[in-house]
């Protein structure tokens, strides 16, 4: 009996492994094909097409972050070319891979400059973007990233040629702090995080903003151990600190445990968290205790007709749902082409002027850019759990 | 003082949670000197089984006390079957080989069970209903300690007493001690070693399942990974208390729970684990066999 069992398991394990390989291989090839295909099929060139560079990770580990941007750019360009192009000229897409590595990104940027790209959608990763921006800056090329969230890229002021259609890492913390101080009028806050890159990063920004503001005081700043069986000691500590609210940077499994334990101990401390918590699982798990919890999250685009249309176009063309940053890339391409159309030129100053002054309708909403390069109208909203759903809160 | 008491009780709860898992760990180790890494997964499977039974019985509209008793029993039986089977499949064929082989087999079993539940159930966190009723007499202390926590303390103490009694005073316990001391000799004098080991796994697994149901009911959520983290901590606790010893497992768990709780409360939770493990290292330097472990030298 036992021997049969053993054999059975060996077969199951062997089949499982085979399954993994069968499933794994074709996907990789598909990705490679996608990465090379765009370069091989240049758009039909009329006299002097506008060259739109698309740079990012198109192969390697992070290809899934870069490929959707290529597809978005191709779809937008295809639509525009079918409608007489931009400013009377056709648009050509130049795709260059940077594998998300800064040292490769400089070569990618140089290649795009040599190929006379007029504007660039990219790059994808913050590190690679930073490495490439200097090269574009020297050549007077504007780059717009759908995904690079590092705050310094716009805030340092080093890159006047950089724009992005995603909110920076600190925007969420800024919103949480503003909401807590301006809207809720709180004075004593505890900041907790899960020690991870995402949660701790947010918590550090929140703490920094709170300390810079004299209206409020950070009474507790602590990292908790993710996955621990319970958080009663930390919850007691919050209680003792006299905090009116907890700002938590992290994900929903820990958040639901903390909230549940606070409420069970009879504490009505306000709980403010991030888009790692703005997840239906949080409400499902924390149940009645989730009520009243605040969480910031990206502005809802699911009802935006342009977003629905863009996703539909992707499904028709590629037969699947779009990947990461697709809508951001769609918006970036639209914004850049719109700026060229409105200014009628590919000149650096003209495009800059148009990006900052002209509102453009995108799947992310109607946007334009501030003088640092961050998109106005893209970003985060505050939600509150009300009756088992996240309801957006007017600020 | 209130703060101290709250941290003390919080640590007691955490320690009791570890203890419910550590008891099974230490029992298996005591008999066959195998660190059963799949034990945490048995705990998790117990929690999942409990959740399924609870969902069904709640739909049928049963009384909550009946539900938690039946759910615990079903989870215990189901997990005991798992423990029994795992021993037969993964450990028994390796009994004659090096100890390392069985250890690797245990780690493999742990990964296998985690992924099995991940695929067969879900990767999401699931809400686990709190079924222990709020006792009337507990109302004045509700903000300090919950009824569920009292139940966890009591069950942990009962399980410890039961196991000590089982090992010290019953015929099966005598056989278990004999197998622990010298397996070959026990076999020669007519002890059914296979039966004793299977029995050990059955008891250990059902205790883990009981812990799984109670603890999940206290915490309010489960997923496929809860057993792994709790299992590692319980293992540390068992080593701390002296692996192989029942009271040692409970004492070690409580010490670990209190260490974590007080360190978080008075210093910082950032280095909670670091501190807990430094404490473990210190204890093992001064008492290599753990707090209550017997430091008998290996027979050559």
Image (cartoon, coloured by chain):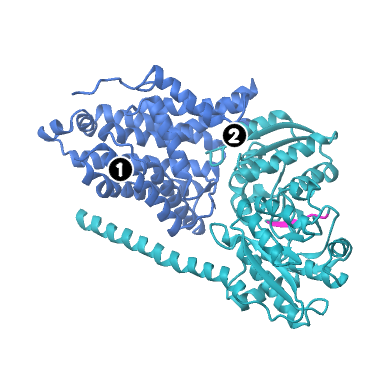
Chain colours: A cyan, B blue
Give the secondary structure at mark 2: helix
Does residue A385 appear left or right of residue B248 in this picture? right
Residue at image position (52%, 31%) is B273
Residue B42 image-quadrant placement: top left
Does residue B123 appear left or right of residue A215 in this picture? left
Residue farthest along the front direction in this orientation: A114
Vertical position of residue B81 compared to residue A206: above or below: below
Residue B26 image-quadrant placement: top left
Spatial CA span between label 2 and label 1:
32 Å
Q: Which residues are magenta?
A: A389-394
* Quarter containing the N terminus of chain A: bottom left
- Is B186 in the magenta? no
Chain letter, disc 1 residue:
B
Residue at image position (10%, 32%) is B189
Q: Residue B158, how many percent across, how many down? A: 40, 31
- Is A393 in the magenta? yes
Dominant SS of magenta comes to strand
Mark yes or no: residue B132 visible.
no
Query: Which disc number belongs to residue B202?
Result: 1
Q: Residue A261, how many percent across, how many down? A: 62, 39
Q: On the image, numbered disc 2 is attached to which residue?
A: A232
Does residue B248 appear left or right of residue A256 in this picture? left
């Amino acid at each position: 009996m036992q021997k049969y069992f053993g054999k059975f398991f060996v077969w199951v394990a062997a089949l499982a492994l085979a399954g993994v390989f069968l499933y794994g291989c074709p996907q990789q090839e598909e990705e490679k094909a996608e990465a090379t295909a765009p370069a091989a099929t240049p758009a039909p060139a009329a006299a002097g097409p506008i060259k739109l560079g698309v740079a990012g990770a198109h192969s390697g580990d992070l290809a899934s972050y870069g490929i959707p941007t290529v597809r978005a750019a191709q779809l937008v360009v295809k639509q525009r070319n079918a409608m007489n192009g931009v400013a009377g000229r056709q648009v050509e897409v130049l795709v260059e891979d940077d594998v998300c590595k800064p040292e490769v990104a400089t070569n990618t940027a140089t290649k795009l400059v040599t190929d006379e790209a007029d504007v660039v959608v990219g790059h994808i990763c913050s590190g690679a973007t930073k490495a490439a921006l200097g090269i574009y800056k020297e050549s007077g090329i504007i780059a717009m990233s759908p995904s690079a969230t590092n705050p310094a890229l716009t805030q340092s002021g080093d890159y006047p040629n950089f724009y992005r259609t995603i909110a920076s890492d600190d925007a969420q913390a800024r919103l949480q702090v503003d909401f807590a101080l301006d809207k809720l009028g709180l004075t004593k806050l505890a900041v907790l995080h899960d020690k991870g890159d995402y949660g701790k990063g947010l918590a550090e920004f929140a703490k920094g903003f709170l300390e810079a503001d004299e209206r409020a005081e950070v009474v507790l700043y602590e990292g908790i151990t993710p996955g621990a069986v319970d958080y009663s000691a930390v919850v007691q500590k919050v209680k003792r600190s006299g905090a009116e609210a907890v700002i938590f940077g992290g994900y929903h499994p820990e958040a639901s445990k903390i909230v549940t334990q606070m409420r069970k101990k009879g504490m009505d401390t306000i709980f403010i968290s991030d888009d790692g918590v703005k997840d239906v699982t949080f409400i499902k798990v924390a149940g009645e205790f989730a009520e009243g919890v605040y969480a910031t999250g990206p502005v809802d685009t699911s009802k935006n007709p342009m977003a629905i249309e863009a996703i539909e176009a992707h499904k028709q063309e590629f037969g699947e749902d779009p990947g990461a940053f697709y809508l951001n890339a769609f918006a970036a391409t639209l914004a850049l082409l719109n700026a060229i159309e409105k200014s009628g030129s590919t000149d650096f100053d003209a495009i800059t002027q148009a990006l900052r002054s002209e509102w453009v309708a995108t799947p992310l909403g109607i946007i334009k850019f501030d003088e640092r390069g961050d998109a106005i109208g893209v970003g985060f909203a505050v939600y509150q759990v009300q009756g088992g759903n996240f309801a957006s809160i007017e600020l | 003082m209130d703060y101290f008491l709250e941290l003390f009780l919080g640590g007691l709860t955490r320690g009791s949670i570890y203890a419910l898992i550590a008891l099974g760990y230490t029992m298996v180790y005591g008999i066959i000197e195998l660190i059963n890494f799949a034990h945490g997964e048995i705990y998790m499977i117990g929690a999942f089984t409990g959740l399924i039974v609870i969902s069904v019985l709640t739909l049928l509209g049963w009384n909550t006390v009946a539900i938690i008793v039946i759910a615990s029993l079903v989870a215990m039986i189901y997990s005991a079957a798992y423990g029994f089977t795992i021993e037969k499949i993964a450990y028994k064929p390796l009994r004659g080989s090096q100890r390392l082989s069985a250890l690797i087999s245990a780690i493999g079993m742990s990964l296998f069970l985690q992924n099995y539940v991940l695929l067969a159930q879900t990767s999401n966190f699931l809400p686990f209903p709190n079924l222990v009723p709020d006792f009337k007499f507990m109302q004045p202390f509700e903000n300090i300690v919950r009824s569920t926590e009292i139940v966890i303390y009591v069950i942990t103490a009962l399980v410890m007493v039961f196991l000590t009694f089982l090992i010290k005073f019953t015929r099966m316990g005598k056989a278990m001690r004999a197998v622990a001391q010298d397996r070959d000799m026990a076999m020669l004098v007519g002890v059914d070693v296979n039966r004793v080991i299977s029995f050990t796994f059955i008891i250990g697994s059902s205790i883990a399942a009981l812990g799984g149901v109670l603890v999940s009911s206290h915490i309010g959520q489960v997923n496929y990974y809860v057993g792994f983290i709790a299992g590692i901590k319980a293992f540390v606790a068992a080593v701390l208390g002296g692996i192989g010893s029942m009271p040692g497992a409970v004492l070690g768990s409580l010490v670990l729970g209190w260490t974590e709780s007080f360190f978080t409360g008075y210093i910082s939770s950032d280095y909670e684990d670091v501190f807990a493990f430094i404490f473990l290292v210190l204890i093992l330097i001064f008492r290599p066999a753990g707090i209550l472990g017997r430091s008998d030298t290996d027979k050559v």
